[in-house]
Amino acid sequence: MGRSPCCEKAHTNKGAWTKEEDQRLIEYIRTHGEGCWRSLPKAAGLLRCGKSCRLRWINYLRPDLKRGNFTEEEDELIIKLHSLLGNKWSLIAGRLPGRTDNEIKNYWNTHIKRKLISRGVDPQTHRPINESAGAGTAVMDFRNGSPTALPVAQINLMADGRRRRSTAASAPAANGLVKAEPKTETLEEANNYCTSSGTTTEEDQRQEKQDVVLGQSSPVLDLELSIGLGPFQSFDTAQSKLVRVVPNNNHQLLFGRAVQYSPEMVSSQGAAAAVCLCCHLGSQGSSSSSPEFCRNCQSTNGFFRFHRPPNS
DNA sequence: AATGACGCCAACCGCAACAGC
DNA sequence: CGCTGTTGCGGTTGGCGTCAT
């Protein structure tokens, strides 16, 4: 039983890519385009598995990648997107032109987590740390698809904890416990930046990219990418393909799985969070200020469910 | 200068989703 | 409708560079 490995591991290279391998991959994709990752290594004369080639291309070799440090605007945008999407790095990356999911994930784990903790915000729940820690409660986080009890009384600061060997000199950091200062950024504040333009085209993406390059980027959340708005096409940069969403009275959340938010979680994140996500993000032309859950997102068993229709 | 601790990032792994048959 | 192959995603790890002692 079990699936055969994606490649013949005995005959593939692993580890860091050489310049020559990079060149071969670039040349091949330049002439043949992306796709068919499984057959690509052989065709390109690379002793790598397709997955590895894809990763290398997407995360490092793609010509449209933006290199260099993240800007303050990008930081804030990532934080806001994460507060709404959770660890959906590919979706977040889709809103940051030139950035990859891997890059954002790494950046989150190494920088933003600490930044939020220093603000007194739990990076997983985006709630004030002292609020949840004080009660000694666990918070159910549904944004990653399945509920996870988070012992938020203790927040592990160390993103790279696997080799954090404790020493007497660095004990506070090594044990990962942080006393956070109570400063909060509510979701409401975050959502003040939200728009619901409704459509995103490749042209939009280009424009957005230009804006960023020109330093005109504002921390705008444009979450049409997944929520059931009107007819639109969302360009998923990570997949380089168009995703078409058909208008539907059932508000759709096309994150791949049903997402559930507990009322407690929603209401505790600020006034604006206590809004049906569909409506709040602009579906069906509803007002973003309407503090209601729409019929399609009504609760079952205490949770608010956003779902995709059975035929999608 | 040497050594250990830490920070960072590229790459790997396993699994889920998707597509085609 | 189930099976199989492919692709994409998110979590994790390896290893190198930098910092602190």
Image: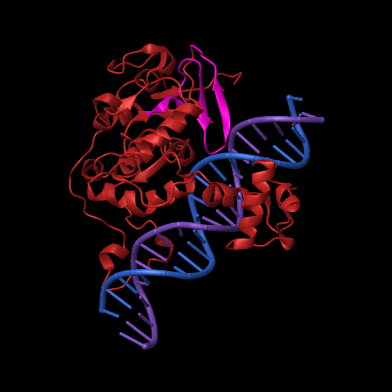
Chain colours: A red, B purple, C blue
Span colored in magenta: A222-249
Image label count: 0
Q: Which quarter of the image is occupied by the C terminus of chain A?
A: top right
Q: Position of residue A198 (x, y in %)?
A: 42, 19
**Taking the image as drawn, is residue A220 in sight?**
yes
Q: Quadrant of residue A136?
A: top left
- Residue A234 lies in the magenta-colored region: yes
Residue visible at 35% across and 17% down?
Answer: A293
- Residue A3 lies in the magenta-colored region: no
In the image, residue A40 above or below residue A191: below
Residue visible at 42% across and 38% down?
Answer: A96
Q: Position of residue A227 (x, y in %)?
A: 45, 23
Q: Position of residue A266 (x, y in %)?
A: 32, 28
In this image, C4 relative to A30: left or right?
Answer: right
> Residue A23 or A46: which is nearer the viewer?
A23
Q: Quadrant of residue A212?
A: top left
Q: Position of residue A237 (x, y in %)?
A: 52, 36
Residue visible at 40% across and 60% down?
Answer: A161
In this image, A24 relative to A257: left or right?
Answer: right
In the image, residue C1 above or below residue A58: above
